[in-house]
Image (cartoon, grey):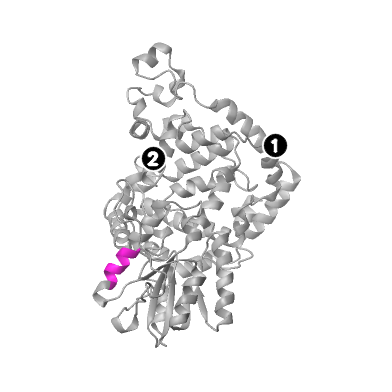
Amino acid sequence: MQTIDIVWLKRDLRLTDHQPLQQALLSKFPTVLLYVFEPMLLDNPHYSERHWRFVWQSLTDMNATLAPLSHNVTIMHGDALECFRSISNHFQINAVFSHQEIGLNCTFERDKDIATWFQKHNIPWHEYDFGAVIRGAANRTHWDKHWNKVMREPILDIQLHNKALTTLDTVNLNHAFSPPLNWQSKLKGMQTGGSSLAWKTLHDFFQQRGREYYRSLSSPTASRVACTRLSPYLAWGNISLRQVYQSLLQHWHVTGFRRSLVALSSRLHWHCHFMQKFESECQMEFRCLNKAYEPLLEHNSSRDLLLLEAWKQGKTGIPLVDASMRCLHRTGYLNFRMRAMLVSFLTHHLNIDWRAGVTHLAQLFLDFEPGIHYPQFQMQAGITGINTIRIYNPTKQAQEHDSEGKFILKWLPELSKVPVPLLFEPWKMTAMEAIMYDLDSSTPYLNPIIDIESNAKTARERLWTWRKRLDVKEEGQRILSRHVRLSSHKKRG
């Protein structure tokens, strides 16, 4: 029976700066690169077809790199534990190597079962840190120093060669996988997966696009070009955060880039910061980070499914909200401010529990990353007890960041004849103007699902009243001590 090592790929779909792969290649046994399409994830409400197409594209790109070596990623379908059992029936597994996964509860439970099975069968499982996230961290003491150390460490130079690799026959293992046809073609408007495109996108940013990054972040239109657009490549591991950060440092003194690079550097730091939050308190997948908010949501939240569905489909009658949601449906991308506005509108203006919308946006975000998604969602929902409560006014956001209405008009063609400034508040037009601008009397843009001003006022009263409660403040102190570095904690005090 042949002895092999296995590199279990998850959200690290690349062949560069990959510690598990580097360590496996040091072994005297041939290495299998393994990816498993698991039914529990394929059917999970956080994911949709767009994610698995991106994963397939990433694997295809890896295989193109491996082709000259006459090898490829071994792609299996089935329960991960069953796949390992099948492999062990045909091969002697010397060791398994992988990155730690900052994932959902279902993957955490899966990993515990697999760890037990590995231990029972004397198979060492070597897990390596994911970026600068520290598994089991109880506080943020020295965390920033750790982040800087990890991000400045040398990029791992992976030397692939034919004899170091082997590929398994998945048909013989009874876990073969054939992707659906709709995974095998590019989707117009949606970014394509793979390390090759990740690097192309990064280089393009530093060649020119990034010069306008710092001033274009908030614009739903300009951000599509000026932002790095690396988020899905980072989420699925086509490129490492360290590779991006060190590329940033290499361009630090390029004329005209400094302000943009300062802004980008802070956001790369936030990337691991939020993932660390989730790693340290993963129960936020199911409950409020600040548990004192649970009674508020249980007893005061709206359960109006019609309002929820209107939000999901981009049919609220509020132009910027609907344009943002429809843009997400078609492209999988939206800048940070518009994402925050969508969550704010759901949880504040509609007063709907954040849990009712959290998987919907996860399905739409091509760059869905559990460790970032949940902390960010709760922060924007105003239920942490430590962050500033922001109730975004979608009309004001449109006036300030889409002043010419380009973004709204692109995604809401039914408003194509409505001029600025009526475009931002079409419900204020007269009956004669509605006829003039070809608006049907039944359109939600003449009768939106809520009144922005009155609902915002109610939300402010609700949230700020609750924020003053003693139990919210006490929970807030617990959160600060665990998730905020000491210097920031003192500043807050």
Q: Which residue in the protein does label 1 denote?
A: 465
How far across and down, in percent of the image, does residue 67 sit? 26, 72
Q: Earlier in the sequence, mark 1 or mark 2?
A: 2
Could you tell me which secondary element the residue under label 1 belongs to? helix
Q: How many marks?
A: 2
- Residue farthest to the top, as pictured: 432
Q: Quadrant of residue 347?
A: top right
The mark lying in front, picked from 1 and 2, is 2
Residue 186 as seen in the image, left or right of residue 156: left
Residue 329 as seen in the image, left or right of residue 115: left
Q: What residue do we see at 37% from left, 42% from top?
A: 330
Q: What residue do we see at 57% from left, 34% from top?
A: 350
Could you tell me which secondary element the residue under label 2 belongs to? helix
Q: Amino acid at mark 1?
A: Thr
Q: What residue do we see at 48% from left, 67% from top?
A: 130
- Position of residue 213 relative to residue 119, above or below, is above
Segment colored magenta: 59-66
Q: Which mark is residue 39?
A: none
Q: Is residue 129 visible?
A: no
Q: In the depicted view, which residue is nearer to us: 476 or 327?
A: 327
Q: Quadrant of residue 402?
A: top left
Q: In the depicted view, which residue is nearer to us: 340 or 389?
A: 340
Distance between the alpha carbons at the discs numbered 1 and 2: 35 Å
- Position of residue 37 relative to residue 225, above or below, is below
